[in-house]
Image (cartoon, helix red, strand yellow):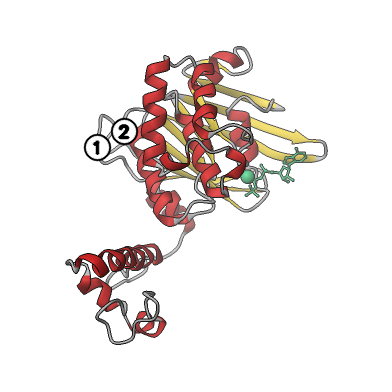
Amino acid sequence: MLEVDNLAKRYGDVLALKDLTVRVEEGQCLVLLGRNGAGKTTALRCMGGVLLPTAGTVKVDGIDAAEDPAAVRARIGLMPEVPGLYERMSARAYLDHFGAIYDIEPGLRRRRISELLETFELADAGDRWLGTFSKGMRQKVALIRATLHRPRLVLADEPTSALDPDSARRAWDYLRDLQSEGCALVICTHSMEEAEHLAAPAKSGEFAGSPGAIGIMSAGRALAIGNLSKLRRLSGLKTRKQVRQLPTLQDVYLAIVGSHHGLAETRSAGDAAAGAAQRFGGPGGPSRRNGWPDEERIVNV
Ligand SMILES: Nc1ncnc2c1ncn2[C@@H]1O[C@H](COP(=O)(O)OP(=O)(O)OP(=O)(O)O)[C@@H](O)[C@H]1O
Ligand SMILES: [Mg+2]
């Protein structure tokens, strides 16, 4: 699907990318990690045909990006690091505009746009100008734009860096759904959780079990590429003995936010969320302040 050979990019004196060779097959995800300035965005932009490499080749579905950039671009969806959106267009009109450029039939693109705005909780804001959108809302629109035409390959540069944890999970689920339909992904990120999640073998679909890879970049070079077990081996670190796994910060955050939403319902309906609400000092709890959980009780949970 994606074949990258000896890719290099020089900006003046800076050799931003050196000799990157990698393959990504259908339904697979390659995650690029690395410090600021390591060359991740440069690699992604070269793969997407928006940046001319100094050396090396990129092929998508066997088509050389240097020989037929238009054919390669038609097969990919590129989500840039900083989404440049048209400020004076509504989200719906903007996505419809790109859907038309991608040649998606009008009825189908309206349906898809509505579904995706719904998925990313933007349905109510869909008719507002993009200039009024928050950073996270813009990032969601950029992700929808990059994937609207169901490309064979999605290249996404820090796709969830501005998203709240709940929305990030939605974005990951969405990307994994695309993957299970055979879409290949290349993602740059600084989130270890995102990397582990997206590079894990697909659980369902035709490509179930197909392992992803994580590439660790530094100073323009890919230091190591492989799945987590391979990277663990390459790292030379000894196994860590763990009696049991503790919940992650994200799990705790979601539980607390979920209970707080339960709080609002409990006030009117007195429903089953009361138990969870009380644990966080909600209605019926001994020390409720303005409907917000009591900090001390949260500390004690
Ligand atoms: N347009 C440019 N002109 C000159 N140098 C550039 C340009 N774009 C990037 N660079 C340089 O290339 C190197 C790699 O940058 P790149 O944006 O690919 O890093 P990155 O890994 O994506 O970093 P980050 O994690 O901060 O997004 C850096 O040294 C950067 O300064
Ligand atoms: Mg970058």
What residue lies at 56% left-to-right and 49% top-to-bottom?
Answer: 134
Nearest the eye: 79 or 142: 142
Q: CA distance from mark 2 to mark 1?
A: 6 Å
Question: Residue 192, percent across and down?
Answer: 47, 55
Disc 1 packing (10 Å; few <14; some 14–19; many ≥20): some
Image quadrant where residue 108 sits? top left
What residue lies at 24% left-to-right and 80% top-to-bottom?
Answer: 284
- Taking the image as shown, residue 157 lies to the left or right of residue 202, namely right
- Taking the image as shown, residue 121 lies to the left or right of residue 218, namely left
Can see residue 92?
yes
Can see residue 28?
no
The amino acid on which the numbered mark 1 sits, given as a three-letter code, is: Ser
Question: Residue 41, percent across and down?
Answer: 62, 40
Residue ID for mark 2: 180
- In the rendered image, the quadrant that contains the C terminus is bottom left
Residue ID for mark 1: 204
What residue lies at 31% left-to-right and 71% top-to-bottom?
Answer: 242
The amino acid on which the numbered mark 2 sits, given as a three-letter code, is: Ser
SS assignment at label 2: helix
In the depicted structure, whether residue 61 falls above or below residue 200: above
Contact? badges 2 and 1 (CB < 8 Å): yes
- Taking the image as shown, residue 195 lies to the left or right of residue 79, namely left
What residue lies at 19% left-to-right and 69% top-to-bottom?
Answer: 270
Disc 2 packing (10 Å; few <14; some 14–19; many ≥20): many
Nearest the eye: 54 or 250: 250
Nearest the eye: 30 or 255: 255
